Image: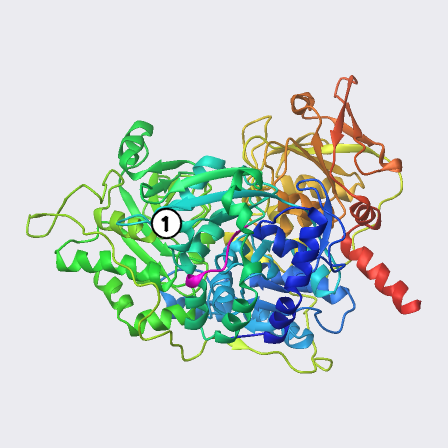
């Protein structure tokens, strides 16, 4: 259904004036990315050009979306802001706390029982502050947003790293931490460094086994997990127009895995069709009136190399299906080479589980293509050799696919339908295995495959592919099988081949649903009471972090020097820890327990100078905090990649970490550190990482004159009394330095609110 039509109408009413002002200010034709960004400047029409990758800019997003795991902390913070209602349309989606165990009905019932306190809190906060609430079982945030809220040319932020999914409907949709959501819900500007723009020109047309998922799997192989950092990826060309709206969403969704700020497609007929199919004809009529502003200027398409910071071209006619992994989403293998690679690396070729669905690939088209393969397993007398699960993206998709018989087809193949939730994709999976120490392989149509991501097992080799490829592998049970050319033996002993998948973009009978799961907030929530039990181990009201003491930071101790990949999963694991996302002190007991200590190669074992022995990272941090000693975390490249979870910044802040010094940051995590009043610093010379020793005491100098663009100095005092010094860079602007001084961005909001009330 169509929500917030008044807001959408206002965006489109000002689109022409704002884009024309931007074109005059910039002095050249504009990309689609630039049109949408300049149309959402907080201060109105553009009067100057902003330098890509350099200038910090204040934006005014149209809406905010939050999933239940991150919404808890975001809304606990918003409650401190002193606002009676959210300033922009906002929603909460209950999708992360449902664990996949046996099947949809039982798992959903268990989730209601186990998470009642959290669900009640989120429902009451939403009701009080004018926030739309989507109940458990309604679906995964990104699918629900695509079905109900996304619109071409709009701008939104969401407290989940896969918020860019809405780019499939022409929206600039960016994953952020909860503190950023609080800013926007409070009516304040949202700050972002004006991104670079990477153009991906798609030519030709997909056929056979190739799907939109293969586009992003290919792009991930080209750009790697950090190649998109600081950039928006803009897809265009005849190939882009030839694919479905939900297929575009898949590509934008997994763009998070290349570090991209977001990804976006221009408005076209596939978007019109999807909007109409989801009962948003009014949005089509409004968008059509400004259609010229919902695509890049013609000059950009005619000479793309002159307007994009980087240009990639992919011919869809020759693109092979891909399988990416294991352990990282940018290890990209064409299906024709995959069997040889599996053998070469001695990865377990026996496939134990195939999993399809998730926010990345759970559209009607995805499920019809997969069902066409599952149907062949039955008709050709093939028995699936691996376990097989299906996660619908929303109740709308689940109800419609059930009506059309697709879920029955999966059941006949032996598939288990899980709840409309994130489930195994985020580690919410009680996996059944007879030996967790055995090296094993799974394949999913999800987006992320870091070690231990899906099932908490470091021995699991997780691969990522399209749903139809996953289904074919589940039937074969063998990763050296190539469904394009290889045959299988059926129960009659006959050799059979799988035919190419067939998909239906949109349901011929239309979408249907009995209860979509939406609860509208009260017109006036002033009398709604939000209760948090002081004895709760799931929820905890927040107290503001202490402001900066006004001096250089001296006498800090090294907490951990992390080596290699250190994602937000390493810093603040999900899975069983999700239950504590609303209780900062409890969830801090998982802080950095997955990070590898550079001095011993072990996880969660660091030197504690107070006890002169080794202990867990959280226990060591608590010891230093109790003694009034601040600590420092040191990291490697692309530190904090992955999820948008701000707990990965709030936990260190809560346990006394004052600075994080790394070779390079992932975008969202760096911002989250700044928001929580911490120092996010990078080595001016990356080789200085090697100077840091296990027992070091650390001073950070130059803070009394903390200035944008001016490096700070770090002095190390080693155990033997010798010293090393080096410079560290930062990207703090004047406003962000004020966050640091105030102790956090939220502290500054509260201070400004108090001054306004007294003014």
| Residue 23 seen anywhere in this rendered image of the structure | yes
In which quarter of the view is residue 393 placed? bottom left
Coloring basis for residues = rainbow
Q: Is residue 511 magenta?
A: no
Q: Is residue 266 magenta?
A: yes
Residue 720 at x, y percent in the picture: 76, 17
Residue at left offset 44%, top offset 39%: 313
Q: Where does the C terminus fall, quadrant-wise?
A: bottom right
Residue 704 at x, y percent in the picture: 89, 37
In which quarter of the view is residue 74 placed? bottom right
In which quarter of the view is residue 39 placed? bottom right
Report the residue marked by disc 1. 444
Residue 139 at x, y percent in the picture: 46, 67
Q: How many marks?
A: 1
649 above or below 269?
Answer: above
Residue at left offset 28%, top offset 57%: 370
Q: Residues within 10 Å of mark 1 (few under 14, many from 20)?
A: many
SS of the residue under disc 1:
strand
Report whether 682 appears left or right of 71. right
Residue 191 at x, y percent in the picture: 72, 52
Q: Nearer the viewer, residue 168 or 471?
A: 168
685 above or below 335?
Answer: above
Q: Nearer the viewer, residue 323 or 572?
A: 323
| Residue 328 seen anywhere in this rendered image of the structure | no
318 above or below 66?
Answer: above
Q: Nearer the viewer, residue 11 or 724?
A: 11
Span of residues in magenta: 263-270
């Amino acid at each position: 259904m169509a929500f917030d039509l008044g807001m959408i109408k206002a965006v489109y009413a000002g689109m022409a004036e704002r884009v024309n002002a931007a074109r005059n200010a910039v002095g050249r034709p504009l990309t689609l990315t630039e049109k949408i960004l300049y149309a959402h400047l907080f201060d109105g029409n553009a009067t100057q050009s902003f330098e890509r990758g350099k200038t910090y800019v204040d934006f005014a997003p149209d809406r905010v979306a939050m999933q239940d795991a991150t919404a808890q902390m975001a809304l606990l913070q918003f409650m401190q802001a002193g606002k009676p209602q959210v300033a922009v349309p906002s929603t909460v989606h209950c999708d992360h706390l449902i664990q996949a165990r046996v099947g949809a009905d039982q798992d959903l019932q268990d989730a209601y029982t186990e998470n009642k306190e959290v669900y009640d809190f989120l429902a009451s906060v939403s009701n009080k502050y004018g926030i739309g609430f989507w109940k458990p079982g309604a679906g995964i945030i990104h699918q629900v947003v695509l079905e109900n809220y996304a619109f071409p040319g709009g701008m939104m932020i969401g407290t989940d790293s896969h918020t860019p999914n809405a780019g499939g409907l022409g929206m600039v949709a960016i994953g952020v931490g909860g503190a950023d959501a609080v800013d926007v819900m409070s009516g304040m500007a949202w700050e972002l460094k004006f991104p670079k723009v990477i153009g991906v020109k798609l030519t030709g047309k997909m056929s056979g086994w190739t799907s939109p998922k293969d586009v992003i799997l290919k792009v991930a192989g080209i750009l790697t997990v950090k190649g998109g950092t600081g950039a928006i990826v803009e897809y265009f060309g005849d190939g882009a127009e030839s694919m479905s709206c939900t297929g575009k969403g898949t590509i934008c969704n997994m763009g998070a895995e290349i570090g991209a700020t977001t990804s976006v497609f221009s408005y076209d007929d596939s978007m019109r069709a999807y909007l109409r199919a989801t009962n948003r004809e009014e949005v089509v009529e409004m968008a059509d009136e400004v259609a010229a502003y919902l695509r890049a200027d013609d000059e950009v398409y005619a000479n793309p190399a002159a307007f994009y910071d980087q240009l990639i071209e992919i011919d869809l006619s020759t693109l092979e299906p891909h399988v990416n992994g294991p352990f990282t989403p940018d290890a990209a293998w064409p299906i024709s080479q995959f069997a040889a690679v599996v053998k070469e690396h001695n990865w377990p070729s026996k496939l134990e589980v195939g999993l399809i669905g998730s926010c990345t690939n759970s559209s009607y088209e995805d499920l019809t293509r997969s069902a066409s393969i599952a149907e062949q397993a039955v008709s050709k007398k093939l028995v699936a050799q691996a376990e097989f699960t299906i996660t619908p993206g929303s109740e709308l998709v689940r109800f419609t696919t059930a009506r059309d018989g697709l879920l029955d087809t999966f059941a006949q193949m032996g598939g288990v339908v899980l709840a409309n939730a994130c489930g195994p994709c985020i580690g919410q999976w009680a996996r059944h295995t007879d030996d967790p120490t055995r090296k094993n392989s799974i394949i999913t149509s999800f987006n992320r495959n870091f070690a231990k991501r899906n099932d908490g097992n470091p021995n699991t080799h997780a691969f990522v592919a399209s749903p139809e490829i996953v289904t074919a592998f589940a039937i074969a049970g063998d990763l050296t099988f190539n469904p394009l050319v290889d045959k299988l033996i059926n129960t009659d002993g006959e050799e059979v081949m799988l035919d190419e998948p067939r998909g239906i973009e949109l349901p011929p009978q239309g979408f249907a649903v009995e209860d979509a799961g939406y609860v509208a907030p009260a017109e006036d929530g002033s009398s709604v009471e939000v209760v948090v039990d002081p004895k709760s181990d799931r929820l905890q009201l927040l107290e503001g972090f202490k402001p900066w003491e006004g001096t250089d930071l001296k006498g800090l101790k090294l907490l951990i020097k992390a080596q290699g990949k250190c994602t937000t999963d390493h810093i603040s694991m999900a899975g069983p820890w999700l239950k504590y996302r609303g209780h900062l002190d409890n969830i801090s007991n998982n802080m950095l327990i997955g990070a590898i200590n550079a001095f011993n190669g072990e996880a969660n074992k660091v030197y504690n100078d107070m006890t002169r022995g080794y202990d867990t990272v959280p226990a060591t941090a608590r010891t230093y905090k109790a003694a009034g000693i601040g600590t420092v975390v040191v990291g490697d490249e692309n530190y904090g990649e992955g999820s948008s979870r701000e707990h990965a910044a709030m936990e260190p802040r809560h346990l006394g970490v004052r600075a994080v010094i790394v070779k390079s940051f992932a975008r969202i995590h760096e911002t989250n550190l700044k928001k929580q009043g911490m120092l996010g610093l990078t080595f001016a010379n990356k080789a200085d990482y090697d100077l840091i020793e296990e027992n070091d005491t650390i001073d950070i100098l130059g803070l009394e004159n903390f200035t944008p663009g001016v490096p700070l100095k770090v002095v190390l005092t080693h155990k033997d009394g010798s010293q090393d010094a080096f410079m560290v860079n930062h990207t703090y602007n004047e406003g962000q330095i004020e966050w640091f001084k105030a102790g956090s961005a939220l502290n500054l909001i509260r201070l400004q609110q108090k001054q306004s009330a007294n003014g």
